[in-house]
Amino acid sequence: MENIIKSENIVYFDNNATTKVDEKVVEAMLPFFSEIYGNPSSMYEFGGQVGKYIKDARAQVAELLGASDPQEIIFTSCGTESANMALRGVLEANPQKKHIITTKVEHPCVLNTTKWLEKKGYQVTYLSVNSEGDLDLNEFRNSITHNTAIVACMWANNETGVVFPVEKMAEITKEINPSTVFFVDAVQAAGKIPINVKNTKIDILGISGHKVHAPKGVGAIYIKKGTLVNPLIIGGHQERGKRAGTENVAGIIGLGTASILALKNLDDELTRIKALRDKLERGLLERVFNARVNGSRINRVPNTTNISFEYIEGELILLHLSDLNICASSGSACTSGSLEPSHVLRAMGIPFTAIHGSTRFSLSRYTTEKEIDYVINSIPDVIKKLNSISPFQKQLKELEEIKFARK
Amino acid sequence: MENIIKSENIVYFDNNATTKVDEKVVEAMLPFFSEIYGNPSSMYEFGGQVGKYIKDARAQVAELLGASDPQEIIFTSCGTESANMALRGVLEANPQKKHIITTKVEHPCVLNTTKWLEKKGYQVTYLSVNSEGDLDLNEFRNSITHNTAIVACMWANNETGVVFPVEKMAEITKEINPSTVFFVDAVQAAGKIPINVKNTKIDILGISGHKVHAPKGVGAIYIKKGTLVNPLIIGGHQERGKRAGTENVAGIIGLGTASILALKNLDDELTRIKALRDKLERGLLERVFNARVNGSRINRVPNTTNISFEYIEGELILLHLSDLNICASSGSACTSGSLEPSHVLRAMGIPFTAIHGSTRFSLSRYTTEKEIDYVINSIPDVIKKLNSISPFQKQLKELEEIKFARK
């Protein structure tokens, strides 16, 4: 383990990709590896006692999501599995309906699943968004038919942080077709904004552990009592027959603890973290003339800002940030590596010259003001350097003049 | 955490249900929770470096399984997911073939999946076993047709430890229909007997982390190069598009380390653990007249013995063992709770009066001779007590007389 970059050596602004596991979460998990390691399905107490801890974790996740009954929570291996289970499990349980509604800006776990379902004969409506990343609720309303099996919609967008009015959308759905199931991918919303499923008409909602300071490899899905969802992973009787396979006990305990911590930190998220994010955003917009924020600055989770540095290349920005030990990303980790321009920003109609220079900064409870200052103070020079080698000198000059004229 | 039963307070003989995570495995995993926590899909080195550790773990699992190329290893969330992926992924990739061959004694992750597939129009052959738990290779040979998409067969049975000749069966399969895919559920074989997939005609092989002293919540699947298997969980590009969802990094690292430890311990398993199992078995057979071993005593993994205490109730035995702090099980953890008599022992034609009193003892590298002696010395009294309240007094008396006559 030499030449390793540990968390203390970096300035981490990529919490929408993954988060540091909270020390309290690790502490809660540890006994379940080598001490209390029984299989919860066992008859004897050494195994059976583990079931009680899983029950506690289920109640903790229910609390984070505002579910009225912990039995509505099923543990999965990740947010992606939750989304796969929701879509495919609902469709299999309702084989007569062949229409799906989703949005153009969903995570690949939804979009690649709906593409797969299209090949199986399903018809999919992909709702568009405007330049702010917002949906048109009339377009949504008009797309619901008697044949609509499920609506799959994210609560908060992973790239821009833009929040969709899923509570309102669930109401519209039930108003037009009460038998249509409303599924929310809340992976980027949990722990960042209040969630209270029991007061909504949302039927299914998925979350991921590692986005809320629990470890990678565990997720959960809320399934409102009475909603028919077939299991995705078939086998033993675990999770009351909804998800087979020996439970990821330590991960589940970790997600439970992380849920309670997320609830406790929600106020901090909505105030301190939001203020830090706003300071970062303002600081960069003031100092960098070709910086612009992508997506609504009003309907947004508190921890995210997606900033385009126009006319320069995002990959180059990230490499330079990496040299400064700043971790940020150009969109979703699940699509990175592909070098394809963000499908989210494209759907918003952002010009390509801005999409390419887009950078997402996502904060967490561990983000400090010092880190914000460091980013604000170091990025302008990086951008200045990159501007100087951009092939779009004419456009940059025009942009700079406009900015100065405004001042 | 009061009134907790920790591992130091129990005598654990249920390693086929789950195992204690090796301290070295926990140690290897720990840095990946809160220190080296980056998302391996990230562009920056803090995330990217994690990919290198996953690569190492992949090579370690490949070594345990004797795969020639680490890229043939895909990480999953458990053995059940591996089996679901194998069956459904192969069938989806080969939609023209509609026949499946499996055995009557598979784990529920295979049997419940094939039952589900039957409802989807697939025809399934369930191979029978004899009273020793062995398959009839002629019956197997005759069941393979041009329409057979996949054979799903366990390497070692979870309840009896009986080993199937999967290497031979894979050869028979390819001889009759080279396009039939041969899948092995090796969850109970890995770490217990040598596995060397590169010298076999096995196409796919699944394992589970928590059966080899890695944590619960991680598994792997070997897919021989060139074998078409569609992903089960759809989304991002992780695991080269074969399994979406952010990688369970700590779990994967843990499974890698556990694989190397399992390889190192294989000799111990085949000698010391086998000798302990044999001592336990002999000790109980000698001291308890109504004890009998279920399944072949020759073709068996070294750590397992399935013993029936005839004419008494298995649940009662387990409760009494639990009072003695001995953890053992009456069959698979994944079917326990159902109280249904074991489908494995039923398929073997074991009399019901023996099935009900069946108890599985499964050892591990942590099992000591002292523990074996404790079990041998304490169980006879328990059985004596339970015999005295059995409604089958006449049969018990006959059995006792036969046993004494033999001596």
Image (spheres, coloured by chain):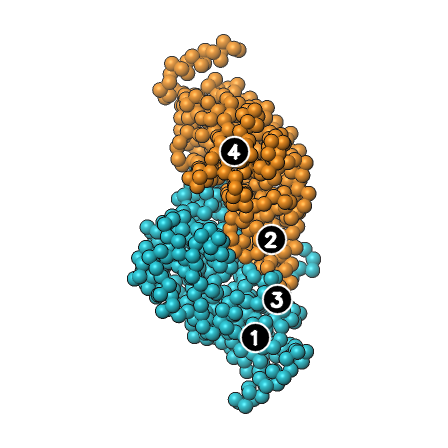
Chain colours: A orange, B cyan
Horizontal arrangement in the rendering, residue A43 relative to residue B31 (left or right): right
Q: CA distance from mark 2 to mark 4?
A: 29 Å
- Give the foreground label among 3 and 4: 4
Q: Residue furthest top?
A: A405
Q: CA distance from mark 3 to mark 1?
A: 27 Å
Q: Earlier in the sequence, mark 3 or mark 1?
A: 3
**What x and y, as percent, mark residue B382?**
64, 76
Please, which chain is the residue tagged with disc 4 on? Answer: A
Q: Is residue A273 above or below residue B291?
A: above
Residue indicated by mark 1: B354
Q: Nearer the viewer, residue A253 or B189?
A: B189
The three-letter code of the residue at mark 3 reads: Ile
Please, which chain is the residue tagged with disc 1 on? Answer: B
The three-letter code of the residue at mark 4 reads: Ile
The three-letter code of the residue at mark 2 reads: Arg
Q: Secondary structure at mark 3?
A: loop
Q: Earlier in the sequence, mark 2 or mark 4?
A: 4
Residue A246 visible in image: yes
Which residue is at 61% across, 79% downward?
B380
Q: Are tags 1 and 2 found on a single chain?
A: no
Residue indicated by mark 4: A101
Q: Are tags 3 and 1 found on a single chain?
A: yes
- Give the foreground label among 3 and 2: 2
Badge 1, how many Cα within 10 Å: few under 14, some, many 20+? Answer: many
The three-letter code of the residue at mark 1 reads: Ala
Please, which chain is the residue tagged with disc 3 on? Answer: B
**What x and y, as percent, mark residue B293?**
51, 76
- Give the foreground label among 3 and 1: 1
Q: Are marks 3 and 4 in contact (CB under 8 Å)?
A: no
Q: Are tags 2 and 4 found on a single chain?
A: yes
